Image (spheres, rainbow, N blue to C red):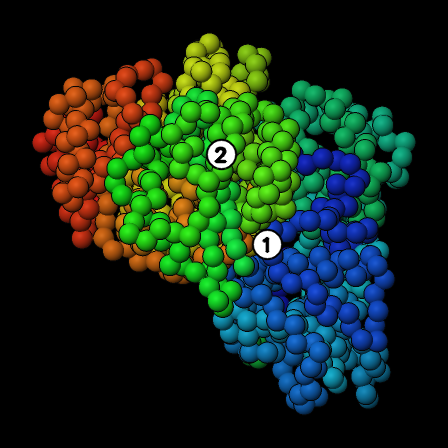
Amino acid sequence: MCPLPALPKTHFCPSQLSLDPLGPEWDCPLGSKDLEEEEGAWGGGSGRPPPGCFSGSWRHDVGLDCKGSLEEAEARAWTVYYYSLLQSCLQQAGLPETQDRSQVPRTGCPGAEVTLCILGSPSTFLSVLLEGGVQSPGNMLLCLSPAWLMKVPAPGQPGQSVLLVSKAVSFYPGGLTFLDDFVPPRRATYFLAGLGLGPGRGREAAELARDLTCPTGASAELARLLEDRLLTRRLLAQQGGVAVPATLAFTYKPPALLRVGDASPGLRLVELSGKEGQETLVKEEVGTFLRSKALGDALQVAVKLSGWRWRGRQALRLYPRVELGTVVDTVLALLEKLEEEESVLVEAVCPPARLPFPGSPPPGPALAVRICAVVCRTQGDRPLLSKVSVARVQVLTLLPRPSPALMSLWAVRTGLCGTGAPCHSRWRWHWPGAAWPGVRGPCGGHRALRGKKKPAQKLHLVESDPNHFASQLVQTFIHFDVTEHRRDEENARLLAELVRARGLQLDGCFSYWDDCLVLTALLCQELGLPCSPPTAMRLAKQKSRTQLHLLRCQGPPWPAPSLHAVPCCPLGCEADVDRAVHQVPLPGVMKLEFGAGAVGVRLVEDAPQCHEHFSRITRDLQGEADHPGIGLGWGNAMLLMEFIEGTEHDVDLVVFGGRLLAAFVSDNGPTRLPGFTETAACMPTGLGPEQEAQLVQAAFRCCLGCGLLDGVFNVELKLTGAGPKLIEINPRMGGFYLRDWILELYGVDLLLAAAMVACGLRPALPTHPRARGHLVGVMCLVSQHLQALSSTASRETLQALHEQGLLRFNLLEEVLVPGEYEEPYCSVACAGPSLAEARLRLLGLCQGLGIDGPHYPVAHFLSHFK
């Protein structure tokens, strides 16, 4: 590394590891309001914090006021903001909520304690705080406001001050945290502050850190040096010979370090005499830069602000290299925001990295990487890298449809035990192997309520088909047509009126059918029932909105959901296809925005294939009648997303109040490209614990990023060389065989869990469920197995083998009719004490039944499960 100028003395240097994907999907708006929000309080911004930012539920009636140091309304809002951020971080890490014990102040022995105090954002310093709570319980303190601290003159040390802590969040082993008052205040023996410029809290933090008798982990001088991207880039290029992106910088009253030294290759500095009247100079310099050879083959440039006040924030815009006027206008707009020692950068954009896979061509340019470490120094001044821890209940249920015109609403009513807890004996729903006649759904057919003991329930059904067989099985039947889901808001209001008119006092409403998810949320909103908000359901329902929204979720908390999102582009018309192929790297995947069952999903390798597939879907799948049950009631809009290499997995989550209660991971076999219909699966996953945990956390964070706080959700991901990547979120329990498999292997009924969460009841689930064996299964398709399904592997044969315990049979379709856009007809699985044994049993069974063959090689589909 190159030598750096002498740094101000410090004992602690916190930073982060950041992988910056450079692409157009990370565009940020340039309005002053947006930039101020990006900056935040610790960066020196002003104004109130953004409202409603954090997902989860926790107590808000906590004692955040500090006695003797009252905050103004704006400062108080930021304190509440950072307290909510801390609770969100703790909740996502599976740690308990902070306990408020400020009403009973801590006394202690003044001056005798070790007091490690951090003033800053909880998400930035969480790993340090948690580790400090382990190494020195109760002595690692987080202050959420400068008002919780005060400086007093140090006795006998003129010009020096002592820092006292009156209020803080204390950290203990196991992630336990407490909101504490200290009487008398504790004397800080070490202080670390998140710093920034400007009129906000950054200036207060910098002032608190100045001239203290105790060691400090940061200073305004150090932050000014480390947080200026242009200065860092200049020093690296000059003294270390490190290659940096071609950069044009307009600087306003630059720091002294930028004024000295020779020019750096590819880095052009233009010092401005003022922020106004620079139009001619900017136009000339930008034009010369965009035509220069320094940009090489770069097709785009980024325009952004640089300076320690911006602290590396990605407040930027990306433009084609040829758009001189637009780049100039953006630079001029940003010049108005500059303060002293800040710059506007115009720099080359490198294409995203392509990670290598077996048989793939060499990868492209590497990712832009900023690596920083959390480094302490021992008493002997040796560096030490710390580890980073990185009444009555009624349920209204929307059931799947056995026909194009069917939408079912079920209400379940049960009593409570005398203690007020749910009486689980009355929730004993029995689901035998035989499916309801005519019912097909994402779980492979839902079962009749049977058993020796009848549950104490009342069912209420709202159905589009007046002659539906279930109308005779319920207490209340309402005929109502809700097949046009683009009218869900109107239908939700009408249904709510019908429910009230019937005097039905419901306590919950849920759905496990894709088309009815938004309607469910809207109806819950109308009736005041627990549910994730309709905005969250809409986000998850439309696949491109899911990805594009998550791409903008840069955190906090971290790691941000954007790490798992995939570039995509919505396709509403033919013209959108031309635009998409220039924005989304090919090969790509085209699919229906609201589709289900992988119908119409296809790998496309070039622009002609994109146009061809778009035209075919637009012609063949126009409405619900063309292919019932795959979401065409929402329209036939499509999207193009980047194709990602890796193994495919399903993660089924149970989330309650924003907390993850349970997760079940299954593996999928390779699909038959260019289609993506599922071929095989196994459960539990064959991945190692670390990779399994990555998938679970990715799925959970993507759900929270969309605002899905309560329910049972199914998340489809791929595990790539760059970690988990999101395929899509299904904001209902997993389809096909997943509920049955989870019930068999783990003893957990996702349907019951969904019903309980819908009623506001927390399901009692094992934190770390252990599977009782292994299941491996394959899908049967009419197009590939018509002969076998009509003879050796008939429905009757498979059902008989299921009843004998020789296989698990999930019927997914009712008729043996082949079609161009098909879904699996059934799932056939075998169990075993090990993955290998279950796989061998299934392979032998498929060979005997005629399911295996040259055009459907089961052995290949099971090859991932080893």
Dot 1 falls on a residue whose secondary structure is loop
Q: Residue 178 — which label?
A: none
At x 47% / y 18%, what residue is drawn?
Answer: 624
At x 28% / y 21%, what residue is drawn?
Answer: 815
Residue 572 visible here: yes
Residue indicated by mark 1: 56
At x 32% / y 34%, what residue is drawn?
Answer: 436
Q: As displayed, is residue 451 above or below residue 171?
A: above
Residue 795 is situated, as x and y percent measured from the top left of the image, at 19, 29
Q: Is residue 658 left or right of residue 258?
A: left
Residue indicated by mark 2: 477
Q: As displayed, is residue 742 above or below residue 178?
A: above
Label 2 CA crowd tier, 10 Å (few <14, some 14–19, many 20+):
some
- Which amino acid, mark 1? Gly
Dot 2 falls on a residue whose secondary structure is strand
Task: Count the marks.
Answer: 2
* Lower sequence index among marks 1 and 2: 1
Q: Residue furthest left?
A: 848
Looking at the figure, which quarter contains the N terminus?
Answer: bottom right
Q: As displayed, is residue 527 above or below residue 498?
A: below
Number of the front mark, 1 or 2: 2
Residue 427 is situated, as x and y percent measured from the top left of the image, at 40, 54
- Which amino acid, mark 2? Phe
Q: What is the CA distance from the residue labelled 1 to the residue labelled 2?
A: 36 Å
Q: Is residue 858 left or right of residue 138?
A: left
Looking at the figure, which quarter contains the C terminus?
Answer: top left
At x 38% / y 27%, what residue is drawn?
Answer: 402
Residue 233 is situated, as x and y percent measured from the top left of the image, at 64, 46
Residue 114 is situated, as x and y percent measured from the top left of the image, at 63, 82
Label 1 CA crowd tier, 10 Å (few <14, some 14–19, many 20+):
many
Residue 591 visible here: no
Camera-side residue of 831 and 403: 403
